Image (cartoon, rainbow, N blue to C red):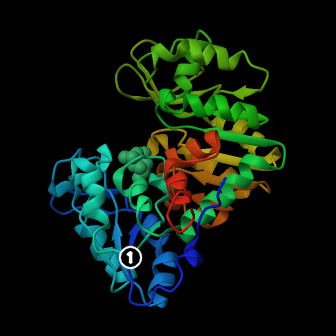
Amino acid sequence: MPRLPILEDLGDLAGKRVLVRTDFNVPMAGPDNARVITDDFRIRAALPTINWLQERGATVVCASHLGRPKGQISEKYSMAPVRARLHELAPGVELLENLRFNPGEEANSADFVKQLVSGFDAYVNDAFGAAHRSHASVVGPPLTLPSAAGRLLQREVEVLGNLREHPKRPFIAVLGGAKVSDKLGVIEALLQKVDALVIGGGMCFTFLAAKGMPVGDSICEIDQLNVCKKLLAGDKPIYLPEDLVGLDANGEYATFGVRIPDGAKGLDIGPGTAAAFTDVIMDARTVFWNGPMGVFEDTRFANGTKTIAQAVADTKAYTIVGGGDSAAALAQFGLDDEVDHVSTGGGASLEFLELGDLPGLAALRGAPNVR
Ligand code: 3PG
Ligand code: MG
């Protein structure tokens, strides 16, 4: 396999125009016409690459998607707030408008690729969080432009590649987040690599239901029950919640065992579960965490995620946290400096762990300066 080209492979960049694909898909809040960035981690993460290119005399033009505007121009997804923050952090950098305003981005249209690369001398991909998408700005430019992975992409591949190939054992993965179906492929692949799996968050209810527990109105993907049953029947331990908290049928805060009554809804792991998961995390030598344990934006349901974040911060294990929500949770609890690696990619880090490669990486390896 040809190696991944890095910035040094671009040669002399003085006076050159470089298109940098970044993942500035940052969390935002507020009304559509006055959105504010709630976490600029992904913007700061691209600065080493931007600075490196500027120091070598290149003109840097960044391009990113923001949200899922589905090919429609909309104020809600305008890059303007991101551009303002970027200019504070890296003066002199241009930022194109939201790539997904053009339907050609997600369709990977050749015309849109042509439009994107026009006027550029080189392309850098530093958008690890979007490297699992075969979109025009991710896979198109390396067909014609000399290309390289930026520092952020390079580091992510190094760290996650090591995790995939030589983890210190016990290696455990802690998974949360809402949708099981999104993550089933990776759960199966992770089970081959880890010594144990810890499951919380919305996805735990499909597993609990697969064990025959009533889940009330909790989120549950009925069509995935059989797959979950099969996974549970494997030889690797899968830890599931033993208690939960949520809302009862009247919408009042309630605590439950593993059985959720009719009309009630589990929204976070309970304190007993959080303590049990903490023990597993403390005994591990490698921990990969992706996905919150509950609806932590609501302070009533933040304790599970907070306890797990604290355990990931406290354990002596090598710790990697992937995904926008888990990273945002760490930042919210002031623990983002306490883990070994915070990945800027959620879906991308899971897909890389599963497959060991991503469309964006394959595209870079095929660039004209590598072939
Ligand atoms: C993300 O935040 O997951 C990445 O920016 C990719 O965005 P997407 O899931 O909308 O493709
Ligand atoms: Mg995503």
Quarter that holds the C terminus? bottom right
Point 61% across, 62% down: residue: 4
User: In the rendering, at what x and y percent does residue 203 appear?
Assistant: 52, 29
Residue 364 versus residue 62: which sits nearer the camera?
A: 364
Is residue 88 visible to the viewer in this orientation of the structure? yes
Point 44% across, 52% down: residue: 130
Name the element at disc 1.
loop
Residue 44 versus residue 267: which sits nearer the camera?
A: 44
Q: Which residue is mark 1?
A: 121
Question: Is 331 situated left or right of 284 in this image?
Answer: left
Q: Quadrant of residue 207?
A: top right
What amino acid is found at the position of numbered circle 1 in the picture? Answer: Asp
Question: Is 78 situated left or right of 156 in this image?
Answer: left
User: In the rendering, at what x and y percent does residue 275 appear?
Assistant: 70, 39
Q: How many marks?
A: 1
Point 29% across, 51% down: residue: 110
User: In the rendering, at what x and y percent does residue 297 appear?
Assistant: 41, 47
Question: Is 109 situated left or right of 233 in this image?
Answer: left
Is residue 260 visible to the viewer in this orientation of the structure? no
Point 66% across, 20% down: residue: 231
Asked if 311 appears above or below 81 in the picture, the reply is above
Asked if 161 appears above or below 16 in the picture, the reply is above
Q: Quadrant of residue 334?
A: bottom right
Ligand 1 is within 8 Å of the C-beta of the residue at disc 1: no
